[in-house]
Amino acid sequence: MSAAGKVVCVTGASGYIASWIVKLLLDRGYTVKATVRSLSDPNKTNHLLSLHGATERLQLFEANLMEEGSFDSVVDGCEGVFHTASPCVLEVNNPQEELIKPAVKGTQNVLCSCAKVPSIKRVVVTSSMASVVFNNRPRNPDVVVDETWYSDPVYCEESKLFYHLSKTLAEDAAWKLSRENGIDLVTINPGFVIGPLLQPTLNLTSEALLNLIKNGTGLFSDGVYRYVDVRDVALAHIQAFEVSSASGRYCLVGTVSTTTETLNILHKLYPALNLPGRGENENPVRPPYQEALPQVLKNACLTLRMLKSSQEQHMLGFGDPGGRFGGFGSMDGRNVLQGRR
Ligand SMILES: NC(=O)c1ccc[n+]([C@@H]2O[C@H](COP(=O)([O-])OP(=O)(O)OC[C@H]3O[C@@H](n4cnc5c(N)ncnc54)[C@H](OP(=O)(O)O)[C@@H]3O)[C@@H](O)[C@H]2O)c1
Protein backbone atom coordinates (compact mmCIF):
# COMPACT_ATOMS: atom_id res chain seq x y z
CA MET A 1 0.00 0.00 0.00
CA SER A 2 1.43 3.41 -0.92
CA ALA A 3 0.98 5.82 1.93
CA ALA A 4 1.74 9.06 0.09
CA GLY A 5 -1.25 11.39 0.31
CA LYS A 6 -3.10 9.18 2.79
CA VAL A 7 -4.40 10.87 5.92
CA VAL A 8 -4.73 8.98 9.19
CA CYS A 9 -5.45 9.91 12.81
CA VAL A 10 -3.65 8.78 15.97
CA THR A 11 -5.31 9.47 19.34
CA GLY A 12 -3.21 9.97 22.47
CA ALA A 13 -0.24 10.67 20.20
CA SER A 14 2.09 11.88 22.93
CA GLY A 15 2.01 8.47 24.64
CA TYR A 16 4.70 5.80 24.54
CA ILE A 17 3.16 3.47 21.97
CA ALA A 18 1.38 6.17 19.97
CA SER A 19 4.57 8.21 19.53
CA TRP A 20 6.12 5.20 17.80
CA ILE A 21 3.01 4.74 15.66
CA VAL A 22 3.24 8.41 14.60
CA LYS A 23 6.95 8.02 13.84
CA LEU A 24 6.47 4.92 11.68
CA LEU A 25 3.50 6.47 9.88
CA LEU A 26 5.48 9.61 9.05
CA ASP A 27 8.41 7.46 7.90
CA ARG A 28 6.04 5.69 5.49
CA GLY A 29 4.76 8.94 4.00
CA TYR A 30 1.38 9.27 5.73
CA THR A 31 -0.09 12.60 6.74
CA VAL A 32 -0.89 12.23 10.44
CA LYS A 33 -3.58 14.07 12.38
CA ALA A 34 -2.52 13.44 15.95
CA THR A 35 -4.46 14.24 19.12
CA VAL A 36 -2.94 15.27 22.43
CA ARG A 37 -4.65 16.47 25.58
CA SER A 38 -2.72 19.71 25.76
CA LEU A 39 -0.99 21.52 22.94
CA SER A 40 0.74 23.83 25.39
CA ASP A 41 2.77 21.13 27.16
CA PRO A 42 6.12 20.78 25.34
CA ASN A 43 6.74 17.40 27.05
CA LYS A 44 3.76 16.09 25.10
CA THR A 45 4.46 17.69 21.75
CA ASN A 46 8.15 18.50 21.15
CA HIS A 47 9.23 14.91 20.53
CA LEU A 48 6.47 14.55 17.94
CA LEU A 49 7.22 17.85 16.23
CA SER A 50 10.88 16.87 15.89
CA LEU A 51 10.13 13.59 14.08
CA HIS A 52 11.31 13.23 10.50
CA GLY A 53 8.51 14.42 8.20
CA ALA A 54 6.61 16.19 11.00
CA THR A 55 7.05 19.68 9.59
CA GLU A 56 5.36 18.70 6.35
CA ARG A 57 2.91 16.00 7.40
CA LEU A 58 2.07 16.11 11.13
CA GLN A 59 -0.88 18.10 12.41
CA LEU A 60 -1.53 18.27 16.16
CA PHE A 61 -5.01 18.71 17.65
CA GLU A 62 -6.32 18.95 21.20
CA ALA A 63 -8.90 16.32 22.10
CA ASN A 64 -10.16 14.76 25.32
CA LEU A 65 -11.61 11.30 25.67
CA MET A 66 -14.31 12.57 28.03
CA GLU A 67 -15.69 15.20 25.66
CA GLU A 68 -18.34 14.03 23.27
CA GLY A 69 -17.58 15.11 19.70
CA SER A 70 -14.01 16.02 20.66
CA PHE A 71 -12.63 13.83 17.87
CA ASP A 72 -15.16 14.74 15.14
CA SER A 73 -13.08 17.29 13.29
CA VAL A 74 -9.86 15.29 13.71
CA VAL A 75 -11.07 12.05 12.15
CA ASP A 76 -12.86 13.93 9.38
CA GLY A 77 -11.07 13.27 6.08
CA CYS A 78 -9.05 10.32 7.42
CA GLU A 79 -8.75 6.87 5.87
CA GLY A 80 -7.58 5.22 9.03
CA VAL A 81 -7.82 5.88 12.75
CA PHE A 82 -5.49 4.48 15.38
CA HIS A 83 -7.20 4.81 18.74
CA THR A 84 -4.53 4.46 21.39
CA ALA A 85 -5.47 7.05 24.03
CA SER A 86 -6.56 5.47 27.29
CA PRO A 87 -5.37 5.85 30.87
CA CYS A 88 -2.48 3.46 31.38
CA VAL A 89 -2.11 3.38 35.17
CA LEU A 90 -2.56 0.65 37.75
CA GLU A 91 -2.91 2.59 40.98
CA VAL A 92 -5.95 4.85 41.22
CA ASN A 93 -8.18 6.17 43.99
CA ASN A 94 -11.35 6.16 41.95
CA PRO A 95 -11.31 3.40 39.32
CA GLN A 96 -14.58 4.51 37.71
CA GLU A 97 -13.53 8.13 37.19
CA GLU A 98 -9.82 7.65 36.55
CA LEU A 99 -9.82 4.47 34.47
CA ILE A 100 -13.11 2.99 33.40
CA LYS A 101 -15.00 6.08 32.25
CA PRO A 102 -12.17 7.57 30.16
CA ALA A 103 -11.36 4.19 28.62
CA VAL A 104 -14.93 3.20 27.77
CA LYS A 105 -16.48 6.61 27.11
CA GLY A 106 -13.37 7.64 25.21
CA THR A 107 -13.56 4.58 22.96
CA GLN A 108 -17.26 5.23 22.37
CA ASN A 109 -16.57 8.88 21.55
CA VAL A 110 -13.82 8.05 19.07
CA LEU A 111 -15.82 5.26 17.40
CA CYS A 112 -18.95 7.45 17.19
CA SER A 113 -16.88 10.18 15.52
CA CYS A 114 -15.54 7.56 13.08
CA ALA A 115 -19.05 6.31 12.31
CA LYS A 116 -19.88 9.74 10.82
CA VAL A 117 -16.97 9.70 8.35
CA PRO A 118 -17.44 7.60 5.20
CA SER A 119 -13.79 7.99 4.15
CA ILE A 120 -12.59 5.92 7.13
CA LYS A 121 -11.72 2.45 5.88
CA ARG A 122 -10.56 0.92 9.14
CA VAL A 123 -10.17 1.71 12.82
CA VAL A 124 -7.36 0.08 14.78
CA VAL A 125 -7.86 0.12 18.55
CA THR A 126 -5.03 -0.47 21.01
CA SER A 127 -6.48 -3.02 23.37
CA SER A 128 -4.34 -5.21 25.62
CA MET A 129 -3.58 -8.71 26.83
CA ALA A 130 -5.35 -7.33 29.92
CA SER A 131 -8.59 -7.91 28.03
CA VAL A 132 -7.59 -11.45 26.99
CA VAL A 133 -6.10 -13.43 29.85
CA PHE A 134 -7.97 -12.56 33.05
CA ASN A 135 -10.83 -14.97 33.63
CA ASN A 136 -11.66 -18.16 35.50
CA ARG A 137 -11.17 -20.52 32.56
CA PRO A 138 -9.36 -23.70 33.55
CA ARG A 139 -5.68 -23.77 32.65
CA ASN A 140 -3.33 -26.67 32.21
CA PRO A 141 -0.21 -27.27 30.11
CA ASP A 142 -2.35 -28.16 27.08
CA VAL A 143 -4.33 -24.93 27.18
CA VAL A 144 -3.23 -22.22 24.76
CA VAL A 145 -4.25 -18.65 25.54
CA ASP A 146 -4.89 -16.83 22.28
CA GLU A 147 -7.11 -14.23 20.66
CA THR A 148 -10.23 -16.35 21.23
CA TRP A 149 -9.92 -15.62 24.95
CA TYR A 150 -11.66 -12.71 26.68
CA SER A 151 -11.09 -11.38 30.16
CA ASP A 152 -14.14 -11.58 32.39
CA PRO A 153 -15.27 -8.18 33.76
CA VAL A 154 -16.66 -9.79 36.94
CA TYR A 155 -13.36 -11.61 37.55
CA CYS A 156 -11.42 -8.35 36.95
CA GLU A 157 -13.65 -6.37 39.30
CA GLU A 158 -13.57 -9.02 42.06
CA SER A 159 -9.79 -9.23 41.71
CA LYS A 160 -9.56 -5.41 41.81
CA LEU A 161 -7.84 -5.44 38.43
CA PHE A 162 -9.34 -2.10 37.42
CA TYR A 163 -6.96 -1.32 34.55
CA HIS A 164 -7.73 -4.76 33.13
CA LEU A 165 -11.42 -4.07 33.63
CA SER A 166 -11.12 -0.74 31.79
CA LYS A 167 -9.42 -2.39 28.80
CA THR A 168 -11.90 -5.29 28.75
CA LEU A 169 -14.95 -3.01 28.82
CA ALA A 170 -13.40 -0.57 26.32
CA GLU A 171 -12.64 -3.32 23.82
CA ASP A 172 -16.13 -4.72 24.26
CA ALA A 173 -17.58 -1.24 23.61
CA ALA A 174 -15.45 -0.94 20.47
CA TRP A 175 -16.69 -4.25 19.05
CA LYS A 176 -20.30 -3.36 19.86
CA LEU A 177 -20.06 0.00 18.06
CA SER A 178 -18.25 -1.56 15.13
CA ARG A 179 -21.09 -4.05 14.67
CA GLU A 180 -23.80 -1.41 15.09
CA ASN A 181 -22.20 1.05 12.69
CA GLY A 182 -20.49 -1.23 10.18
CA ILE A 183 -17.02 0.01 11.16
CA ASP A 184 -14.13 -2.18 10.01
CA LEU A 185 -12.32 -2.68 13.33
CA VAL A 186 -9.11 -4.47 14.25
CA THR A 187 -7.74 -4.62 17.80
CA ILE A 188 -4.12 -4.98 18.75
CA ASN A 189 -3.69 -6.67 22.13
CA PRO A 190 -0.10 -6.18 23.30
CA GLY A 191 1.40 -7.63 26.43
CA PHE A 192 3.83 -5.66 28.59
CA VAL A 193 5.41 -3.18 26.19
CA ILE A 194 9.10 -2.36 26.59
CA GLY A 195 11.80 -0.81 24.42
CA PRO A 196 13.06 2.64 23.49
CA LEU A 197 11.19 5.78 24.45
CA LEU A 198 10.56 8.67 22.10
CA GLN A 199 8.89 10.90 24.67
CA PRO A 200 10.87 12.60 27.47
CA THR A 201 8.91 11.00 30.31
CA LEU A 202 8.52 7.43 31.55
CA ASN A 203 5.28 5.59 30.92
CA LEU A 204 3.94 2.91 33.27
CA THR A 205 5.76 -0.09 31.78
CA SER A 206 9.08 1.66 31.24
CA GLU A 207 9.00 2.84 34.82
CA ALA A 208 8.10 -0.66 35.99
CA LEU A 209 11.04 -2.18 34.12
CA LEU A 210 13.33 0.45 35.55
CA ASN A 211 12.08 -0.31 39.08
CA LEU A 212 12.70 -4.00 38.49
CA ILE A 213 16.25 -3.29 37.42
CA LYS A 214 16.92 -0.78 40.19
CA ASN A 215 15.42 -2.55 43.18
CA GLY A 216 13.96 -5.86 42.06
CA THR A 217 10.40 -4.69 42.62
CA GLY A 218 8.02 -6.44 40.26
CA LEU A 219 4.80 -4.83 39.05
CA PHE A 220 2.60 -7.92 39.15
CA SER A 221 1.93 -10.16 42.11
CA ASP A 222 2.15 -13.29 39.93
CA GLY A 223 5.57 -12.18 38.60
CA VAL A 224 4.58 -13.03 35.01
CA TYR A 225 5.47 -10.61 32.21
CA ARG A 226 4.27 -10.91 28.61
CA TYR A 227 6.94 -8.79 26.95
CA VAL A 228 6.66 -7.20 23.54
CA ASP A 229 8.80 -4.52 21.92
CA VAL A 230 7.21 -1.14 21.34
CA ARG A 231 8.52 -1.00 17.76
CA ASP A 232 6.79 -4.29 16.95
CA VAL A 233 3.61 -3.02 18.57
CA ALA A 234 3.67 0.16 16.49
CA LEU A 235 4.37 -1.76 13.29
CA ALA A 236 1.57 -4.21 14.06
CA HIS A 237 -0.88 -1.31 14.32
CA ILE A 238 0.15 -0.04 10.90
CA GLN A 239 0.02 -3.48 9.34
CA ALA A 240 -3.42 -3.99 10.86
CA PHE A 241 -4.48 -0.97 8.84
CA GLU A 242 -2.53 -1.66 5.65
CA VAL A 243 -3.10 -5.40 5.27
CA SER A 244 -6.62 -5.59 3.90
CA SER A 245 -7.15 -9.17 5.12
CA ALA A 246 -6.34 -8.25 8.74
CA SER A 247 -9.36 -8.71 10.98
CA GLY A 248 -10.39 -9.36 14.55
CA ARG A 249 -7.91 -9.32 17.41
CA TYR A 250 -4.14 -9.77 17.40
CA CYS A 251 -2.38 -10.79 20.60
CA LEU A 252 1.17 -9.45 20.62
CA VAL A 253 3.49 -11.24 23.02
CA GLY A 254 7.13 -11.80 22.16
CA THR A 255 8.25 -13.60 25.30
CA VAL A 256 6.64 -14.74 28.54
CA SER A 257 9.10 -14.36 31.40
CA THR A 258 8.98 -14.28 35.18
CA THR A 259 10.63 -11.61 37.31
CA THR A 260 13.41 -14.05 38.16
CA GLU A 261 13.98 -15.01 34.53
CA THR A 262 14.08 -11.36 33.48
CA LEU A 263 16.66 -10.51 36.11
CA ASN A 264 18.67 -13.59 35.17
CA ILE A 265 18.75 -12.53 31.52
CA LEU A 266 19.87 -9.05 32.52
CA HIS A 267 22.49 -10.45 34.84
CA LYS A 268 23.85 -12.71 32.11
CA LEU A 269 23.94 -9.90 29.57
CA TYR A 270 25.34 -7.30 31.91
CA PRO A 271 27.35 -9.01 34.66
CA ALA A 272 28.91 -5.69 35.64
CA LEU A 273 25.54 -4.30 36.60
CA ASN A 274 24.81 -4.30 40.29
CA LEU A 275 21.40 -5.89 39.93
CA PRO A 276 19.19 -6.44 42.97
CA GLY A 277 18.61 -9.90 44.49
CA ARG A 278 17.29 -11.78 41.56
CA GLY A 279 13.63 -12.51 42.21
CA GLU A 280 14.18 -13.25 45.88
CA ASN A 281 10.59 -12.43 46.69
CA GLU A 282 9.11 -14.30 43.84
CA ASN A 283 7.99 -17.84 43.44
CA PRO A 284 9.48 -18.42 40.00
CA VAL A 285 6.74 -20.68 38.73
CA ARG A 286 5.85 -20.34 35.11
CA PRO A 287 2.17 -20.09 34.24
CA PRO A 288 0.56 -23.55 33.96
CA TYR A 289 -0.60 -22.92 30.39
CA GLN A 290 0.84 -21.89 27.06
CA GLU A 291 0.43 -18.60 25.31
CA ALA A 292 0.28 -18.50 21.54
CA LEU A 293 3.81 -17.18 20.93
CA PRO A 294 4.62 -15.24 18.95
CA GLN A 295 1.47 -14.02 17.29
CA VAL A 296 2.02 -12.59 13.86
CA LEU A 297 -0.28 -10.61 11.68
CA LYS A 298 -1.36 -13.00 8.99
CA ASN A 299 0.14 -12.04 5.59
CA ALA A 300 2.13 -9.23 7.17
CA CYS A 301 5.46 -10.89 7.87
CA LEU A 302 5.73 -9.42 11.33
CA THR A 303 8.10 -11.40 13.49
CA LEU A 304 8.24 -10.25 17.04
CA ARG A 305 11.52 -9.59 18.76
CA MET A 306 12.11 -12.28 21.35
CA LEU A 307 13.59 -11.53 24.72
CA LYS A 308 15.97 -14.46 24.67
CA SER A 309 17.01 -14.30 21.04
CA SER A 310 19.93 -12.43 19.57
CA GLN A 311 17.61 -9.45 19.50
CA GLU A 312 17.32 -9.30 23.24
CA GLN A 313 19.67 -6.37 23.55
CA HIS A 314 17.36 -4.39 21.34
CA MET A 315 14.33 -5.74 23.12
CA LEU A 316 15.47 -4.41 26.44
CA GLY A 317 16.94 -1.43 24.71
CA PHE A 318 20.35 -1.06 26.31
CA GLY A 319 21.89 1.75 24.34
CA ASP A 320 23.58 5.07 24.47
CA PRO A 321 24.17 6.87 27.75
CA GLY A 322 21.56 9.48 28.45
CA GLY A 323 21.21 10.30 32.12
CA ARG A 324 17.71 11.69 31.84
CA PHE A 325 15.91 9.67 34.44
CA GLY A 326 18.51 9.73 37.21
CA GLY A 327 19.06 6.00 37.35
CA PHE A 328 21.76 3.95 38.99
CA GLY A 329 25.49 3.49 38.59
CA SER A 330 26.63 4.07 35.08
CA MET A 331 23.19 3.26 33.77
CA ASP A 332 20.03 5.26 33.84
CA GLY A 333 16.47 4.99 32.67
CA ARG A 334 17.20 6.32 29.21
CA ASN A 335 20.08 3.91 28.90
CA VAL A 336 18.14 0.94 30.02
CA LEU A 337 15.17 1.67 27.91
CA GLN A 338 16.73 3.13 24.84
CA GLY A 339 17.74 0.95 21.97
CA ARG A 340 18.66 1.43 18.37
CA ARG A 341 16.20 3.64 16.53
N1 LIG B 1 2.42 0.02 27.82
C1 LIG B 1 1.92 -1.20 27.76
O1 LIG B 1 2.56 -2.16 28.19
C2 LIG B 1 0.58 -1.44 27.14
C3 LIG B 1 0.20 -2.78 26.93
C4 LIG B 1 -1.02 -3.05 26.33
C5 LIG B 1 -1.86 -2.01 25.97
N2 LIG B 1 -1.48 -0.73 26.21
C6 LIG B 1 -2.40 0.33 25.79
O2 LIG B 1 -1.71 1.17 24.88
C7 LIG B 1 -2.23 2.49 24.97
C8 LIG B 1 -1.10 3.46 25.19
O3 LIG B 1 -0.39 3.08 26.35
P1 LIG B 1 1.08 3.64 26.63
O4 LIG B 1 1.83 2.55 27.27
O5 LIG B 1 1.58 4.26 25.41
O6 LIG B 1 0.76 4.69 27.78
P2 LIG B 1 0.92 6.28 27.84
O7 LIG B 1 2.26 6.67 27.40
O8 LIG B 1 0.50 6.63 29.24
O9 LIG B 1 -0.16 6.80 26.81
C9 LIG B 1 -1.51 6.96 27.13
C10 LIG B 1 -2.07 8.07 26.27
O10 LIG B 1 -3.48 8.21 26.53
C11 LIG B 1 -3.74 9.58 26.73
N3 LIG B 1 -4.92 9.81 27.57
C12 LIG B 1 -5.16 9.33 28.80
N4 LIG B 1 -6.32 9.83 29.26
C13 LIG B 1 -6.78 10.67 28.30
C14 LIG B 1 -7.92 11.52 28.17
N5 LIG B 1 -8.85 11.62 29.14
N6 LIG B 1 -8.09 12.24 27.03
C15 LIG B 1 -7.17 12.16 26.04
N7 LIG B 1 -6.07 11.39 26.10
C16 LIG B 1 -5.89 10.67 27.22
C17 LIG B 1 -2.51 10.12 27.39
O11 LIG B 1 -2.47 11.51 27.26
P3 LIG B 1 -1.53 12.39 28.21
O12 LIG B 1 -0.16 12.19 27.64
O13 LIG B 1 -2.04 13.77 28.07
O14 LIG B 1 -1.67 11.83 29.59
C18 LIG B 1 -1.42 9.41 26.59
O15 LIG B 1 -1.17 10.09 25.39
C19 LIG B 1 -3.28 2.46 26.06
O16 LIG B 1 -4.52 2.23 25.45
C20 LIG B 1 -2.88 1.25 26.89
O17 LIG B 1 -3.96 0.71 27.59
C21 LIG B 1 -0.29 -0.42 26.79
Image (cartoon, rainbow, N blue to C red):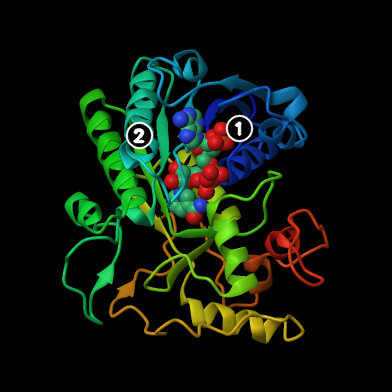
Q: Secondary structure at mark 1?
A: loop
Tell me residue 324's x, y (percent). Answer: 78, 53
Identify the residue at image location x=17%, y=52%.
154
**Residue type for callout 2:** Glu
Q: Is 269 located above or below residue 37 in the figure?
A: below
**Label 2 crowd (10 A; few <14 / some 14-19 / many >=20):** few
Look at mark 1 in the image and give the residue it sits on.
Answer: 3
**Disc 2 or 1, which lies upstream in sequence?**
1
**Vertical placement of residue 260 versus 69, above or below:** below
From what the image shows, is residue 31 above or below residue 251?
above
Q: Can residue 154 be spotted in the picture?
A: yes
Disc 2 from disc 1: Cα separation: 38 Å
Q: In the picture, which quadrant includes the C terminus?
A: bottom right
Residue at the farthest front position = 93
At x 71%, y 60%, the residue is 333
Label 2 sits on residue:
97
Question: Which x, y percent locates residue 39?
Answer: 65, 22
Amino acid bearing label 1:
Ala
The one of 146 and 18 positioned closer to us in this rendering: 18
Q: Using the image, determine if residue 199 lies above or below residue 164.
A: above
Q: With 52 as the anchor, is 185 left or right in this view?
A: left
Q: Quadrant of residue 4?
A: top right
